[in-house]
Amino acid sequence: MSLTKSQEKKYVKLLMRGDIKAFERLFIHYSPKVYNIARTLHVGHEDAEGLVQNLFIKIWERRKELDCHKSFNAYLFTISKSMVLKLFRKTALQTGYEKYALGYLKSSTNETEENIIYEDLSSITSQYLDQLPKKQKQVFILKNIEHLSVDEIAEKLDISTRTVENQIYRASKTLKGKISNLHSISFLAAILISF
C-alpha cells in the first residue's frame, strides 16, 4: 500500500513529535525501497538489512530535524546513497588495511624468525669457532670477520701465504662439518617431533 504525498507529510509531522506508530508506518512503507536501493548499488543482503536499520535509527534520533514540507522519499534516497558510499569506503579501507597489515605481519614475522635463526646460528658458530686450534681461529677471524686478504694475514702474523691458506681451509672444513652435523641433527629432531 503506497502513501500519498499528504499521508507522507502527515506521518512525518507525527514522527517529528515522537509518534511511534507514524514511525512504524513510514518504516513499513519505505524500508523495502531503502533495501532495494542498497541492493541495486551492489550491497550484500546482510549489509543492506543493516543499512536499513541504521538509516531508520538515524531518522528516529533526528526526527525533530525533519522537514515535512520536503519529500521524505527523496530524503531517504539521499541518506541511503550516502550510507552506501560510507559503507564502501569503510570496506575499502578495511580491505586495504588487512592487506597492508597481513603483508606487514608476514614480513615482520619472517624478519623476527630470521633474526632468531641468525642469532642462534651465530651463537653456535661462535662456540665452534672457540673450539678451533688457536692459529686456525686467529686466521679464520682475520679472513672472515676482519676481511683481510691472505697476503695481509701472512704479513700481520709473519707466516707464509701457503700456511694462511692451509689454516683457512682447515678451519672452514671443521666449521662446515660441525654446522652440517648440527643441521642433520635438527632435521632428524624435526622429523621425530612431527610423529
Image (cartoon, helix red, strand yellow):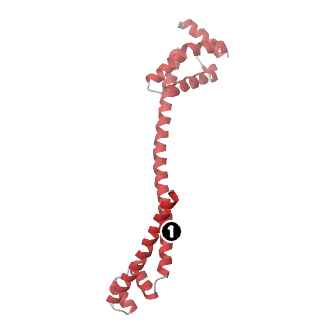
Q: Quadrant of the N terminus?
A: top right
Q: Say what secondary structure mark 1 lies in.
A: helix
| Position of residue 28 measured from the top left corner of the image (x, y, whole percent) | 57, 14
Which residue is painted at 41% across and 85% down in the image? 139
The quarter of the displayed image where residue 138 is located: bottom left
Does residue 101 appear anywhere in the picture?
A: yes
Look at the image and tell me whether residue 146 can be seen: no
Q: What's the amino acid at mark 1?
A: Asp
Residue 87: % across, % down:
50, 31
Q: Is residue 150 above or below residue 25?
A: below
- Residue 9 location, quadrant: top right
- Please tell me how crowded label 1 is: few (under 14), some (14-19), or many (20+) other residues with Cα within 10 Å: few
Measured as percent of width and height from the top left, residue 65 is found at: 61, 21
| Residue 141 placement: quadrant | bottom left
Position of residue 8 relative to residue 154, above or below, is: above
Residue 154: where, in percent of width, then height? Answer: 36, 89
Residue that badge 1 annotates: 120
Q: Which residue: 44% across, 75% down?
A: 178
